[in-house]
Amino acid sequence: MKKLTIYSICILFSGFIFAQKEEPVVEKDTTRLTEVIVIGKRRLSNHRQEKTLSSIDDYLEKSNKVAMIKRGNYAWEPTINNMNSERLNITIDGMQIFGACTDKMDPITSYVDVSNLEKVSVGSGQNGTENGHCVGGGIDLQLPSSKFYQSGFKTNFDLGYETNGNYRVGGLDVEYSGNTFYINTDGIFRKSDNYDAGGNDEVLYSQFQKYNISMQTGFKLSEKHAIDANIIYDKATDVGYPALPMDVSLAEALITSVTHNYVSDSTFINTLETKLYFNTITHIMDDSNRPDVPIRMDMPGWSDTYGFYSKATSTIKRHNLLFNVNGYYNRSLAEMTMYPNDSSQPAMFMYTWPDIRTFYTGIFAKDIFVLSENEQLSGSLRLGYHNNRIAEDVGLESLQIFYPDIEDSKSRFLTSISSNYNYKTTNYDVSFGLGYGERAPSVSEGYGFFLFNSFDNYDYIGNPTLDNEKAIEVNAGANYHKGKFHIGVEASYFYIMDYIIGEIDETLTSMTIGANGVRIYEALPNASIFDVYLNSSYELSNSFSINGTIGYNYGQGSNDENLPLIRPFTFLAEVNYKAKRFNAAIQLEGNGNQSSYSSYYGEDETPSYGVLNLNFGNVYHAKDTKFFLKYGVENILDTNYSTFADWNNIPRQGRNFYMNLSLIL
């Protein structure tokens, strides 16, 4: 029956599966069911960039589809369509990179900064499979493209300060661009003390320090061929996680790549981009700064990834084609050493990730077929081969305690297929899409060994026998434009089969002192997730505009339990003013009461809240120098609140005054 379902979907969509040329950059376009968040730090008029020196987390959180799970003041975990990182495909410029922390304290987004990026592409559901398989969607953190601008030397300075947490930011960017050669180097430093929640309530262990350095260089070999090289070094130290029992003494990443670009308008292939890359991550958890813990632990982790991709675009009559062949090899290893308070007792050691080697290779094809001036039909297909191997014998033997018949290697075949129809006129547009996708269990879900989850207070054990998780999705959107008025709605529904989640095993005893018990990753027969958002805006005049968004989300498993971390009713209202060299905005954002919470999976009820923010921006010119100033106040009323996505209900920041200054020389 399972194979019949897959084949039926493939037959249904087979007439639509061509490949697609890259879509033009848009900031928000529900008809394409994708979103591009522009990172250009000095876009004064962009209302979604209140602070030019915001972290990547702040930028992502402005998207309807994206929510950020917060375990502290640093390194928030992105979710799309109420699905967390295991169900997403998160890449840096198309490169696969995997965190080295078993507690998700280092999502991929934490290893880059705004100084590295040009834009972020967010694809919902199977629209996010260009670089890999997923169920919930994909995020691609895109580096700047080649910069043969012939503009000579340019220098940018950035300074920022925020009162809450004594938060300091400084950045420097130096660039040279010629006709056949360019080089760009930049660095940024961020440091924060503990922040205060509303009412001047200090949140202990919320401090962090981070710096990020990157270099991009390129050579134009001819008018059609160019070579680019990128290197990013990111290092965070003394990172506190108030929602967790441990902090981080080091989170370090080295990300490198070499890319060949070919461009031609006279051959079958319009563009060809081929990249070779390598990245390595070291992540060290420790509890040395915590005054009272039952047992001291060191928990280091490592992740190394080697990979490639080759993307080609072509146009054949009314077909705009994109092909992507990619592959990677990853090594994930994590261990834990426990030191009893009685020094005469021996330390205890185990592998929490037993040196898992993952090999993947796949092919992606996409097409936008132009039916008429107003209509488009698009389709995509991704096929992949995925293999996990346990390289550490001790780790294999540990898992064989629970699964005696498992072998050290397991292979899977993964499929993703989708199709979208768009109709657009001057005043309105509509879209409708269908998709089917699969994903392999993550390293933790498949091979994790006694991983403590402080959210529900259970130890987790992986399950190498899990089947692929599969999802059928339906999405739709509509927009109406009339003069200065706009209103739009977008909705999506996911029916997920073999939904992977931890289930309590009463026969096992926890290893973590004080834990409630042990959960083993199992698969629910199915789960359903639904979301809908209504967006509207109106230009009162050339200077004033208003916009607002409301959203509703729902998630439930086949066991009749609510799914965890499902966003409640949300709202945003904003009034904007813009002039030639000045802009201002006042915003009210918040959530409704989270009444459909999941106590079975460790959640409790989160009260409703509303937060008021005010921001301003100025731009100045002085000869060859431009000054950009952003300033304002967040949480004006100093509200003390937590959201559904704040791990263990840690409160968010109270009142915060900030100022960002950027100079372009």
Image (cartoon, rainbow, N blue to C red):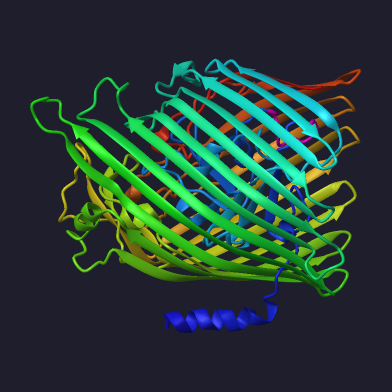
Report the front residue among 462 and 98.
Answer: 98
Depicted 407 relative to depicted 64: above or below: below
- Is residue 107 visible in the rendered image? The answer is yes
Quarter occupied by the C terminus = top right
- The reply, left or right, for residue 46 in relation to residue 327 is right
Q: Position of residue 557 (x, y in %)?
A: 40, 61
Q: Position of residue 258 (x, y in %)?
A: 63, 48
Depicted 318 relative to depicted 589: above or below: below
Residue 203 drawn in magenta = no
For this orientation, the residue located farthest to the left is 344
Residue placed at 76% from the left, 33% from the top?
575
Quarter occupied by the N terminus = bottom left
Quadrant for residue 248, please give it: top left
Q: Which residues are magenta?
A: 43-52
Quadrant for residue 503, please give it: bottom left
Residue 51 drawn in magenta = yes
Residue placed at 24% from the left, 57% from the top?
396
- The reply, left or right, for residue 171 in relation to residue 603 is right
Counting labels gives 0
Q: Position of residue 373 (x, y in %)?
A: 88, 69
Quadrant for residue 310, please give it: bottom right
Q: Position of residue 75 (x, y in %)?
A: 49, 35
- Is residue 42 visible in the rendered image? The answer is no
Report the front residue among 197 and 662.
Answer: 662
Name the magenta segment's main secondary structure: loop
- The reply, left or right, for residue 40 in relation to residue 70 is right
Report the front residue among 394 and 534.
Answer: 394
